[in-house]
Amino acid sequence: MARYQLDPVHTDRERWLKQYYFVRAAFSVAWVAAAFAAGASSPVIAGALLVLYPAWDAAANCADALRSGGFNQNRTQVFNALASVATTIAVVVALQTSMNRVLGIFGAWAIVSGLLQLGTAIRRWRSFGAQWAMVLSGGQSALAGGFFIFQATTPAVPSIANVAGYAAVGALYFLVSAVWLTVGEWRRGVAA
């Protein structure tokens, strides 16, 4: 019998991780739908959604860190939450000036949060399944951030759609991870 089947703490954390990934995917899908449905036609709604996205990420990272052993054991998530709080504040300020600045801030945040997510996934690699998708997600986020920064320097005025595509890909990675953990749990149950 595998170690994780004998360790109730590990089993509990894996179940939490599966639920967490499903919730992150669902939130991102809802956010993307709202961005395309209402955010594209209303600057006020778009602004609120652009503030909500990093604020949600901060709350989600804190919840995951607390549920996965506490802040001391999950420093990458703590730093990710702090970066998301700073991004939320910066987006509120930048919305008063230009969408190019907002996109540049999202770019910097995508790089930092992607690298921190990558660090979290690497740390969890030996203990939990589905981390390959989180590694890909973190790497893709950092690359997308560089592209956002480039786009922010062009004369074209970006919209919430630029960020919505990024959020949609993130939702897919979270969903893949959640499904992968669910299948792994199911297989272990069948084998037992």
Image (cartoon, rainbow, N blue to C red):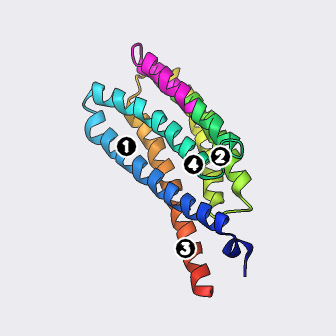
Residue drawn at 69 percent across, 40 percent down? 75
> Given the image, on which type of amino acid does mark 4 rest?
Asp
List x then y, in percent, for residue 12. Answer: 59, 64
SS under mark 2? loop
**Counting other residues with Cα less than 10 Å from the Cα at mark 3, is it few (<14), some (14-19), or many (20 or more)?**
few
Residue that badge 1 annotates: 31
**Counting other residues with Cα less than 10 Å from the Cα at mark 2, is it few (<14), some (14-19), or many (20 or more)?**
some
List x then y, in percent, for residue 4. Answer: 69, 71
In screen coordinates, is 111 left or right of 164? right
> Given the image, on which type of amino acid does mark 2 rest?
Gly
Where is 190 relative to 135, above or below?
Answer: below
> Given the image, on which type of amino acid does mark 1 rest?
Trp
SS under mark 3? helix
Dot 3 or dot 2, earlier in sequence: 2
Dominant secondary-structure state across the stretch colored magenta:
helix
Residue that badge 4 annotates: 64
Dot 1 or dot 4, earlier in sequence: 1
**Counting other residues with Cα less than 10 Å from the Cα at mark 4, is it few (<14), some (14-19), or many (20 or more)?**
many
Q: Verify CB contact (< 8 Å) between mark 1 and mark 4.
A: no
- Distance from disc 3 to disc 2, alpha carbons, whole Å, reads 27 Å
In screen coordinates, is 159 left or right of 91? left
Residue drawn at 55 percent across, 30 percent down? 107
Is residue 142 shown to the viewer in this render?
no
Dot 4 or dot 3, earlier in sequence: 4
Q: Which residues are magenta?
A: 83-105
- Distance from disc 1 to disc 3, alpha carbons, whole Å, reads 26 Å
Where is 122 relative to 92, above or below?
Answer: below
SS under mark 1? helix
List x then y, in percent, for residue 133. Answer: 61, 57
Give the mark count.
Answer: 4
- Distance from disc 1 to disc 4, alpha carbons, whole Å, reads 20 Å
